[in-house]
Amino acid sequence: MTVHPSVLEAIGNTPLIKLQSVSETTGCTILGKAEFLNPGQSVKDRAALYIIRDAEKKGLLRPGGVIVEGTAGNTGIGLTVVAKALGYRTVIVIPETQSQEKKEALKLLGAELVEVPAVPYKNPNNYVKISGRLAEQLAKIEPNGAIWANQFDNIANRQAHIETTAPEIWRDTEGKVDGFICAVGSGGTLAGTGIGLKGFNSNVKIGLVDPDGAALYEYYAHGELKSEGSSITEGIGQGRITANLEGFTPDFACRVSDAESLPYVFDLIEHEGLCLGGSSAINIAGAVKLAKELGPGHTIVTILCDYGNRYQSKLFNPEFLASKGLPVPAWLTKSSNIRVPYETAA
């Protein structure tokens, strides 16, 4: 029997799950790394652990100290899980447009939540910039200090995936991995995993998949940070080259719309028992495109970022989907015709 001394040791070593339908249709083996099985239920637990441990090594955190971050939700959840286990507090700045489910999860874990209007990064009141200023203010008054996690430009994020995600994929595929692809939020998962896998085999193809509204596809494909359209996905879609992306260039880049990607997660629920979020939909759609690029017979890995129930009020809400002009699966609108038998009391 394996016994972990704390929740921290349960972060990572997530399994690979073969995605049956997309594997069959592409002739490739498409594997999803089940990051929703981390304690904080997302891939961001890895970055959270490395960011906090890095701050400890540098002497920036003392017992009872405060960790401040601007996040779409999952990094804040991961930071709070790790912080609680180590005796720290978290103050999380989140755009008010993010799902209510993630906000409630943060509150449940004990984070101090600061909701702000959603504005572009260039705006001084963007949630990331507000979190940086707030960390500076708290560092002056908190008796045990405060740090800014700064997931976008803190390369401890990328290092987490170089040291853990990539070696796990290499180990679990027995080195038989031909491609890896995922979307970008901070850039740590894509760049870190890509760098790590290239260290094992330089021929592994690393791909970027962008949702509509993000600018990296245009940058890597045509040399210009340019965005078009919008997406209901949360936590992915980047308009700049973060520190985690510096020095990294994917071998393949593509862009997919919500209308193209969402049917993949709807199908996974109905036929494969997996309930995943919108970023996983984008990743799977990207894996299909990379499979078509490489041709049949290859093994491709992507990230299954988090559970779909974190977005239930949007992603699995027929009215919300219809309002955005997005496909609504038939099973989501069906009501059960089953009637429960009962007996009246004598």
Image (tube, grey):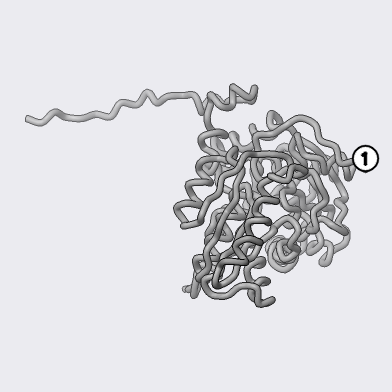
Q: Residue 129 in the image: state x and y as whole percent.
A: 70, 51
Q: Residue 24 in the image: state x and y as whole percent.
A: 70, 40
Residue at 58 percent of width and 40 percent of height: 96
Q: Residue 282 in the image: state x and y as whole percent.
A: 70, 40
Q: Check the image and name the residue furthest to the left.
A: 346
Vertical order, 185 against 247 (above or below): above
Residue at 88 percent of width and 43 percent of height: 219
> Which residue is denoted by mark 1 in the rendering?
222
Residue 3 in view (yes/no):
yes
Residue 37 in view (yes/no):
no
* Tag 1: amino acid: His
Please give the count of numbered marks on the rendered protein. 1
Vertical order, 103 against 178 (above or below): above
Q: Residue 225 in the image: state x and y as whole percent.
A: 86, 41
The quarter in which the C terminus is drawn is top left
Q: In which quarter of the image is residue 198?
A: bottom right
